[in-house]
Image (spheres, rainbow, N blue to C red):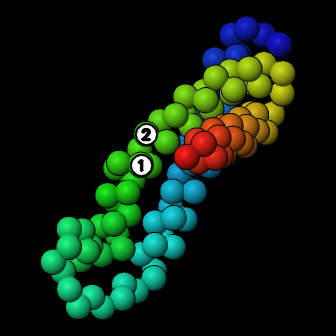
Amino acid sequence: MDHTEAPGRYGRSMAVAFGWYATAIAAVVVGTTSVPSAPRQDCSAMFSCLSPLESLALAGLFWGGPVLVALLIVTAVVDALLVRRIPSVVLAGTLSVAVSVAVGVVVAGAYLGRS
């Protein structure tokens, strides 16, 4: 493999990975906004009268953002290793996302298992 081709392959492979993450985020947004919110009687508690989209944005800001950044870092490292060995950039990007999600599941399981 030519070394001048590797940065272009890495960029295209990371674009595939970003596409997978964008697809997952879009699916969560569509799924959350398509469910009607239940009528609430009492809005005296903090955050009790948020719409589904507002609650999704709040959860994404405080929980989803850091998780996404961590997944992107792991994806970048794994993708750099895979793009050299796998000739298909689509397969390398997809596998890097799958490995990153698996690492995230293991880390979340270890974190939730100890508490």
Kindly report the distance in space between the C-alpha atoms of the residues bearing marks 2 and 1: 6 Å
Residue 79 in the image: above or below residue 42: above
**Where does residue 26 sit, x and y in percent of width and height?**
50, 61
Query: Residue at image x 36%, y 88%?
Result: 38
Question: Mark 1 is on which residue type?
Answer: Trp
Query: Residue at image x 30%, y 91%?
Result: 39
Residue 14 in the image: above or below residue 80: below
Left or right of 110: which side holds 54?
A: left
Residue 10 sits in quarter: top right
Residue 12 sits in quarter: top right
Residue at the far left in the pictured view: 44
Q: Which mark is residue 1?
A: none
**Where does residue 42 sit, x and y in percent of width and height?**
20, 86
Left or right of 22: which side holds 81?
A: right
Q: Which mark is residue 66?
A: 2
Say how many tags the image has.
Answer: 2
User: SS for tag 1?
Assistant: helix
Query: Residue at image x 42%, y 75%?
Result: 33
Residue 56 in the image: above or below residue 50: above
Question: Mark 2 is on which residue type?
Answer: Pro
Query: Residue at image x 44%, y 49%?
Result: 64
**Where does residue 24 sit, x and y in percent of width and height?**
57, 57
- Per the image, the residue denoted by label 1 is 63
Pointer 2 and pointer 1: residues touching (CB < 8 Å)? yes
Left or right of 106: which side holds 28?
A: left
